[in-house]
Amino acid sequence: MKSRWYGWQTLLVDAAALGFASTGSDLSVGIYALGGPVVHWAHGNTWRGVGSLVLRVGAPLALGAAFGYGCEASGNSDGDMGCLGAGIGGAMLGVVGAIVVDSAVLARDTVPVDEDMAVRVGPVRVAPAIAAGRDHGSFLLQGTF
């Protein structure tokens, strides 16, 4: 089995969410939150989809709260809404981090390794191989009977 990356699909969905956000559409939040998990679920990766959903919702909330609280605790607040910018900045950092982790780490399938160059005839399997040494080379036929 080998790993195959399909993060480009989650990144396409996130690009669509960004496109909707640029128009001011409320759909952008739903596409961002559910788009990645739906891609994982379409690949049959149920738990990766759940992890993606938790990451996409939890990271912005946690970082937004942490940045806002840190601003307030440090006394940098300028009135009632003084630390709102810090909270929004933390939430945006959480969104970017979730997108990166989702596409780079979670978006992977395991697929069977192809038997390259092998020929099967009934129960017989023959595959070519090349061996190279310092002063010689060999062409081999490997077989399983």
Image (tube, helix red, strand yellow):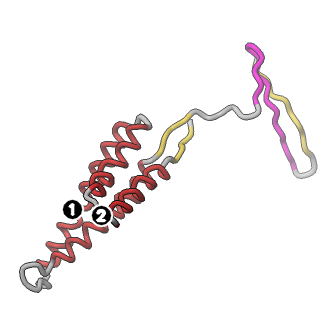
Q: Amino acid at mark 1?
A: Ala
Q: Kindly identify the residue that appears in the image at 36 percent across and 57 percent down.
A: 17
Residue 23 image-quadrant placement: bottom left
Viewer-proximal residue, 138 or 96? 96
Q: Is residue 124 magenta?
A: yes
> Dot 2 lies on which element?
helix
Please tell me the numbered disc located at residue 62: 1
Q: The N terminus appears in which quarter of the rendering?
A: top right
Residue 95 image-quadrant placement: bottom left
Q: The C terminus appears in which quarter of the rendering?
A: top right
Q: Mark 1 to mark 2: distance in Å?
A: 8 Å
Residue occupying the far left of the picture: 80
Crowd tier of the residue under label 2, counting other residues whose Cα lies within 10 Å: few below 14, some 14–19, many 20 or above: many
Viewer-proximal residue, 20 or 73? 20
Q: Kindly identify the residue that appears in the image at 49 percent across and 40 percent down.
A: 109
Decide: marks 1, 2 in contact (CB < 8 A)?
A: yes
Crowd tier of the residue under label 1, counting other residues whose Cα lies within 10 Å: few below 14, some 14–19, many 20 or above: some
- What residue span does the magenta drawing correspond to? 118-133
Q: Is residue 63 magenta?
A: no
User: Sequence order check: which comes first, mark 1 or mark 2?
Assistant: 1
Looking at the picture, how far across and down is residue 37, in whole percent? Answer: 35, 45
Looking at the picture, how far across and down is residue 33, in whole percent? Answer: 29, 52
Direction from residue 67 to residue 120 in the image, left or right: right
> Dot 1 lies on which element?
helix
Q: Amino acid at mark 2?
A: Gly
Direction from residue 8 to residue 75 in the image, left or right: left
Looking at the picture, how far across and down is residue 72, in whole percent? Answer: 12, 78
Prevalent SS, magenta region: strand
Residue occupying the far right of the picture: 135
Q: Kindly identify the residue that appears in the image at 34 percent across and 60 percent down.
A: 20
The residue identified by callout 2 is 94
Looking at the picture, how far across and down is residue 55, in whole percent? Answer: 30, 53
